[in-house]
Image (spheres, rainbow, N blue to C red):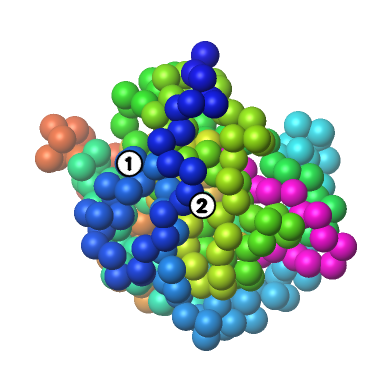
Amino acid sequence: MTDTTTSTPTATIQRVPADTSPAEIKSIVERDGGVILSNFFTVDQVRRFNDEIDPFMTDLEAGSPDKVDLFEGFHGANTKRLTNVVTHSSTFREEMIQDPRILAISDEFLLPVADSYQMTAAQVIEIGPGNKPQPLHRDLENWPIFRDLGPSGYNVTINFLTALSDFTEDNGATRVIPGSSHWDDYEDRGTPENTIPALLNKGDVLLIDGKVAHGGGENKTTDNYRRAMAWSFTIGWLTSEEAHAFLVPLDLVKTLPPKIQNILGFRSFHNASKQGGTLWQANYDDIAKYLEL
């Protein structure tokens, strides 16, 4: 078991300008597990995004749909989660997911592992008053083999956690254990005492890798809702969390650039540079031809 009291190399989450080079961003994340990108999205973009998804958020019930205790604890009894954001928000699909900085950072992290990558999930997460802290976890645990491989395994996913409201320690700011990506035992997710809050302003992005232990914080307020969007990319040969290829209307997909179509699962995954095969095909050809993209 890792000594969590001595293995954290930094007690803070480094904050850098949004235009920091992808290589420097990757270096910081590989060291600490995460980095804050200041003012990444504009106040206007956040406002328009919130306006677009507000009606869908209003219609949602808080908590896990099946009300099973195991999932309710993770999802949050007073937390709303909106998926299929590509369909719901034109600001997201036309500006945010196509932002050249997002794609350059994702390229930097994921193309060394695979020839293309996909968006595994994009979820608006709104933590309501009184919600308990989320259990600490690592995002790579969606694919347990990488948990078993520990720090020596590939880093197969990154998460652009975008603040849609200000994050404070009282309203549920995401808690992170910097350096936990280097622990020998990934079954050790640390304790709340090991965590520090990611204090964000609207439009800031907390970029974390799949190896760092983290979790949503406790909302100790009586009337403050902490809203964020967690949107993650993962290498193309892993199954994504959201089935975007069955959720996003094809007519809408046809308005998007080829790289974004690929990210959403509407084009085949090729891995020739890694001496791998082509996946997600139709008649041994790119699925895009079958879909007439």
Q: Please determine whether, in this image, residue 129 is positioned above or below residue 58.
A: above
Q: Is residue 80 above or below residue 50?
A: above
Crowd class of label 2 (few under 14; some 14 to 19; many from 20; radius 10 Å): many
Please provide percent x and percent y for residue 2.
49, 18
Nearest to N terminus: mark 1 or mark 2: 1
Q: Is residue 165 above or below residue 150?
A: below
Amino acid carrying mark 2 in the image = Ala
**x then y, percent, for residue 212:** 47, 38
> Does the magenta portion include 225?
yes
Q: Determine the secondary structure under disc 1.
A: helix
Name the chief secondary structure element in magenta: loop
Amino acid type, mark 1: Glu
- Quadrant for the C terminus, please: bottom left
Q: Is residue 158 left or right of residue 51?
A: left
Q: Which mark is residue 121?
A: 2
Taking the spot 51% from the left edge, 52% from the top edge, the residue there is 121
The residue sitting at 55% across, 77% down in the picture is 46
Q: Is residue 84 left or right of residue 218?
A: left
* Disc ID at residue 30: 1
Q: Which residues are magenta?
A: 214-227
Mark 2 secondary-structure assignment? strand
Residue visible at 63% across and 63% down in the picture: 167
Coordinates of residue 196 in the picture (x, y in percent): 58, 46
